[in-house]
Image (spheres, rainbow, N blue to C red):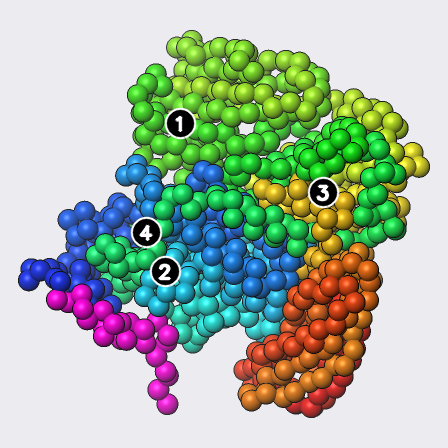
Amino acid sequence: MKKPLSPRLLLSALLVVACAPFAVAQKPDTPLYLDPAQPLPARIHDLVSRMTLEEKASMMQNTTPGVPRLGIPRYDWWSEGLHGVANAGFATVFPQAIGLAAMWDAPLQERIGHVVGVEGRAKYNGYGPDLRGTRFHGLTFWSPNVNIFRDPRWGRGQETYGEDPFLTSQLGVAFVRGIQGDNPRYLLAGACAKHFAVHSGPEPLRHGFNVDPVKADLYETYFPAFEALVRRAHVEVVMTAYNSLYGTPCSINPLLYGSLKDWGFDGQVTSDCGSVDDLVYSYKRAKNQAQAQAMVLKAGMDVTCGAASQGIVKAVQEGLLPEAVVNERVSALLRTMFRLGFFDPKGMDPYASIKPSENDTPAHAALALHAAREAIVLLKNDGVLPLQVAKYPRIAVIGPNASSVPALVGNYNGTPSAPVTVLAGIRAALGSAAQVDYAHGCDYADLRVAVRPVATGWFHGEYFSNPTLSGSPIATRSDRPIFLDGTAATDHEGRALPDGVPGRGISVRWTGNLQTNLGGAYGLTVRVRGGVRLMVDGKTVIDSWTPAPRQSGEERVVTVTRDLPENASLPFTLEYVQGAGPAKIEFEWSSPPAESGEAQALTVAKAADLIVYVGGISAELEGEEMSVPYVGFKGGDRETIELPAVQRALLRKLVALGKPVVYVNLSGSAVAMPWAAEHVDALVQAWYPGEAGGTAVADVLLGKVNPSGRLPVTFYRSTKDLPPFTDYAMAGRTYRYFHGKPLFPFGFGLSYTHFTYSNLHVVREPGDALSVSVDVTNSGDRDGDEVVQLYATPPAASHPRESEALCGFARVHLARGETKTVTIAVPATALRRWDDKANAYAIPSGAWTLRAAASSADIRLTTKVEL
């Protein structure tokens, strides 16, 4: 039986008719590929036929020079838009992805994705020739990350939608639909499902470890979100993972490419950055780049993140790779360009008319605030919240995240134009109604070393092709931290030179602000190969612009100590001129002793009527393959999930004062904090809440907003509750397979009101889908949102491993005293399980248990249904 045409291929055929009027307007000598009335496959074939091998190969790496003679623009396939357009200047910054998952709100998720797409287009349409098409300044966004957050130690888990495959699928589909738009011919922007597949740390091992999951885990946990994004959202790009699956690197794994084909994928496949090199250096599958390129292209990859063109040409010339394969791969890339409107007449692509002014608008800022409010999860409340300000005329705000901008934004973030920290949000909300005192208190954790890279803001880097900082810069970008290494191949941490910057004879100027927390003596250190000048608060503190000739090519360390005030934002300028060797500069600082911070915090706390402790961790500690100087953190991952010891110690001393303590935790992952959960008066999980995070936190604390976020991950009591990090078996992991008692369960979240459930009904729909309805009543005295969750348990004999699994959810707003009937569609795909004997999916027959719940551990109603 023939497979039906994929939606895109069908649309391509229909558009032949839809675009017929444009055929009249074409000049007689117009190339076929520039005629919008022609079928898309024919246009692509015509364009490919006009390209040389070298031109085709140049298209198949992330940084492409374009083919000016054919009108193919310079383009970099790599841009980022995980929760806002990233690394490209000011943009609306929404909560980190894990915070978006805590909203449990697919419609809002789609609206957020749409804003990312609109702002990406607004920026692209407004870029001049120096920026358009350069890295991070394109329209193909390598987001979302739909890996499963199976272990809270993984530093990149913050980028995901949590531990559940159904929730991840629903939110991933919504985000992709939003970012790609709904035009049948054009993409608003291209989205990317990453990292395919079975990828979730440890970060230091990612370039060479193998994963060997049982088939049930592969098909029930690790694959569903990717399948959903391909089948339902028609995601434009899929990125392969670094790791190996069943002994074969993902970049050449036939199981993965075969699955994409089975799902009807007709977009492009990209490597993760440097993963093709891993075939040579880590996996030893190829002897050189030519062999590696031949392997990945024949497997099904279309574009390499990294240098590829020379290897591709050499592979063809040496007979390792048929040019027909190159033609097929470059066709996939050109199809994306056609769908982005690059080759159609002006006026056809409606998205090309989006104005630069549609970036970072007040409406988008309001949506970011709305998302931050929905994402906040109230974990404990002994009656202190919402705060009655009259009872607390003096409030102490204490903690390492209280006045931190980086803690608002997580990783893969844009630059917010008007970020609101938690401290600033509380002060703005209270105004003159209460005195708000602040103390930093302590660092996130104990340091392994005396200094740490400064990461308390963004620094605007201007790169010059001369040693005198003269003329116009040839490149600009936001750097965080300042850590430039001219020998680096990729810039996961901003280390590599920007595109177009030569390797010799350069100078760079960084400007921004240094944000202090404690007052006292700061050590300012520059590690440099070349000359350097450092100005802080208008004063020159380092002036070593012309090193001695013998030092010009040597790396040296320049350190000064300066007294800086507490909680200050100080203008900062760092200027660098390259020496005789490769460019190298790194800026670090050391904070005053922690003891002084703790003493200051206790002094402030003793004078207060109530304490708000704002702690947790930040993307300075958890993230992607990075060096972290803190105890308990390694390579971007956490070694333990407990709240760091230095914060636990301070929190104990604050609680011992006998004042009410509200703990606001900012993190991108679950934090084990059983002592805090027992002893503080209220506990709020705010994630990395985005540009408006401080306003949203204040709104929840003061009762302007009724909290309604729900946990997308399990909060465990201890690291001891977890299986080994490197074990990818799902047994003992997440709410579906963990049999211990969590600190806070998946789906959990409190409200300032109460909800009751009644009248659970189930109707079988065609194709084994279900329609489930339940009446929900707001029985409290405040308006609020409830997130109704449905969990399904298959017949025990057919699937003994799993206790329950999410199969549907809906967010509903209820005025106090109001009752609504909530109807949730349960797709058949949410009920299928992997049948090892049949080597295929099947829906187990028998009596299924369906539960309507307020969380995975708070079951309100239960019924049975025969399937």
Counting other residues with Cα less than 10 Å from the Cα at mark 4, is it few (<14), some (14-19), or many (20 or more)? few
User: Going by the image, does 561 lie left or right of 483?
Assistant: right
Name the residue beneath numbered marker 2: 187
- N-terminal label among 3 and 1: 1
Query: In the displayed structure, would residue 553 be above or below residue 847?
Result: above
Q: Type of residue at label 4?
A: Ser
Q: Which is nearer the eye, 628 or 553?
A: 628
Quick one: quadrant of the C terminus? bottom right
Residue at the image point whose x is 32% and y is 66% from the top: 185
Name the residue beneath numbered marker 4: 353
- N-terminal label among 2 and 3: 2
Q: Locate residue 496, reporting x and y percent.
A: 42, 35
Name the residue beneath numbered marker 1: 462
Q: Which is nearer the eye, 615 or 95?
A: 95
Q: CA distance from mark 1 to mark 2?
A: 32 Å
User: Going by the image, does 544 lie left or right of 167?
Assistant: left
Name the residue beneath numbered marker 3: 698
Query: In the displayed structure, would residue 42 be above or below residue 528?
Result: below
Label 4, secondary structure: give it.
helix
Label 3, secondary structure: give it.
helix
